[in-house]
Image: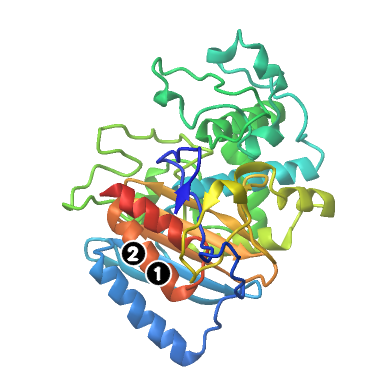
């Protein structure tokens, strides 16, 4: 598959799909096969084989039918000698953004925040103090990746945050945008963002196995990140030596959570809990357009669903299909490959968390998706990413 005119930033995990050589969309069912007792046994054996073949350190998976978890399991080891279990916490990388987004949206629903006000009165990054564009920046733009920021400021030659596009004019996936959003929320509310997440999302849903802050007390429960040689650099650490500090948080990455708790959260989001209908519809409407059908050359792959458009709603990745919408998010770092999504029409979805070296996790994700949802529009994107990792 070739994307015309636009280069795909390697940090962004996009969804891709297939179209027949005639250019006609092949319509498939947007649901996931139910779990009988025999299928559950087959999946358990097959998933064990995937984990072993790709040498995945830790895996957690859940399958959702009609907004209910029907299969949940764990594979590999939480740490050497400790099998993965319901007690295991996974770093889910950029899936953290979905928790941040739902926190902000619920506070909007409560009248405490606004999607369309300027964030400047509540947060002004020192790098932007003389930039007039900052006054036009709104929470809606930050949630839909229309902020105009690059992904992370450290990609800039001078290491400073700046606008590469005027706010609201162009899509650009940005972790910086979500960190900025959290600063706006906590400054306007006068409450630290981690406390807002706890009070708005975790406590109401009974999510006792999730943390957005770095907490040493949880380290023994976190799936231990090991590179392909088995090296351990520390929890919340990068091989180059940087580690997140105790008590710090990231609104864009590094939340740790159990599979079961993320399933609670995903189903709550599917149901639109705590959001009035208009805001829920806004959340589930693509507002940041990443790729249109004209910009996608799907080649001659005919075995998966093909979106008409790819982009983001308010915090969530979206693939617009011929007769449905796929809503979710992906996360990737050097030892995380994670995904969660659902089909809006059927309420069927899945969650897959891999704690594994990046290349191994990408390869295993392809096999896992082909096993659980063989016509998933996510499959080809992972194949492209795996090819780029060589």
SS state under label 2: helix
Q: Nearer the viewer, residue 340 or 318?
A: 318
| Rendered location of residue 196, percent (x, y) | 64, 40
User: Which residue shows up at 39% across the image and 33% down it?
Assistant: 245
Up/down of 129 relative to 46, above or below = above
User: Which residue shows up at 25% across the image and 70% down it?
Assistant: 52
Q: Residues within 10 Å of mark 1 (few under 14, many from 20)?
A: many
| Rendered location of residue 88, percent (x, y) | 39, 61
The answer to which image quadrant residue 108 occupies is top right
| Rendered location of residue 321, percent (x, y) | 64, 62
Which mark is drawn over residue 368? 1
The answer to which image quadrant residue 140 occupies is top right
User: Are dots 1 and 2 in contact, CB under 8 Å?
Assistant: yes
> Which quadrant, please, contains the N terminus?
bottom left
Q: Residues within 10 Å of mark 2 (few under 14, many from 20)?
A: many
Count of number-bearing discs: 2
User: Which residue shows up at 33% across the image and 54% down it?
Assistant: 386
Residue 15 in the figure: left or right of residue 269:
left
Say which residue label 2 marks.
Answer: 364
């Amino acid at each position: 598959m070739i994307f015309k005119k636009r280069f795909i930033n390697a940090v962004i995990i996009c969804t891709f799909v297939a179209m027949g050589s005639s250019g006609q969309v092949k319509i498939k069912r947007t649901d996931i096969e139910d779990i009988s007792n025999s299928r559950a046994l087959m999946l358990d054996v097959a998933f064990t084989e995937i984990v072993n073949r790709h040498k995945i350190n830790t895996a957690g998976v859940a399958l959702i039918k009609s907004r209910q978890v029907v299969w949940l399991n764990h594979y590999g080891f939480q740490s050497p000698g400790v099998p993965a279990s319901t007690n295991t916490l996974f770093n889910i990388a950029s899936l953290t953004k979905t928790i941040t987004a739902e926190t902000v949206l619920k506070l909007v629903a409560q009248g405490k925040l606004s999607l369309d006000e300027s964030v400047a009165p509540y947060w002004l990054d020192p790098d932007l103090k003389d930039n007039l564009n900052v006054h036009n920046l709104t929470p809606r733009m930050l949630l839909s990746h229309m902020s105009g920021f690059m992904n992370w400021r450290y990609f800039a030659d001078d290491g400073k945050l700046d606008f590469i596009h005027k706010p609201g004019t162009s899509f650009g996936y940005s972790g910086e945008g979500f960190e900025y959003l959290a600063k706006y929320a906590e400054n306007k509310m006068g409450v630290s963002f981690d406390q807002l997440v706890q009070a708005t999302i975790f406590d109401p849903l009974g999510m006792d196995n999730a943390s957005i802050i770095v907490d040493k007390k949880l380290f023994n429960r976190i799936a231990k990140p090991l590179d392909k040689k088995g090296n351990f650099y520390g929890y919340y650490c990068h091989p180059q030596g940087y580690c997140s500090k105790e008590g710090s948080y990231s609104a864009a990455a590094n939340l740790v959570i159990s599979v079961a708790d993320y399933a609670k959260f995903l189903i709550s989001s599917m149901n639109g809990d705590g959001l009035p209908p208009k805001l829920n519809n806004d959340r589930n409407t693509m507002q940041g357009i990443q790729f249109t059908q004209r910009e996608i050359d799907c080649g001659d792959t005919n075995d998966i669903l093909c979106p008409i458009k790819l982009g983001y709603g308010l915090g969530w990745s979206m693939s617009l299909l011929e007769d449905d919408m796929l809503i979710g998010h992906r996360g990737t770092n050097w030892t995380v490959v994670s995904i969660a999504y659902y089909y809006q029409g059927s309420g069927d979805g899945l969650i897959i968390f891999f704690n594994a070296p990046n290349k191994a996790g990408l390869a295993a994700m392809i096999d896992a998706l082909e096993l659980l949802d063989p016509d998933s529009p996510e499959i080809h994107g992972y194949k492209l990413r795996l090819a780029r990792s060589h």
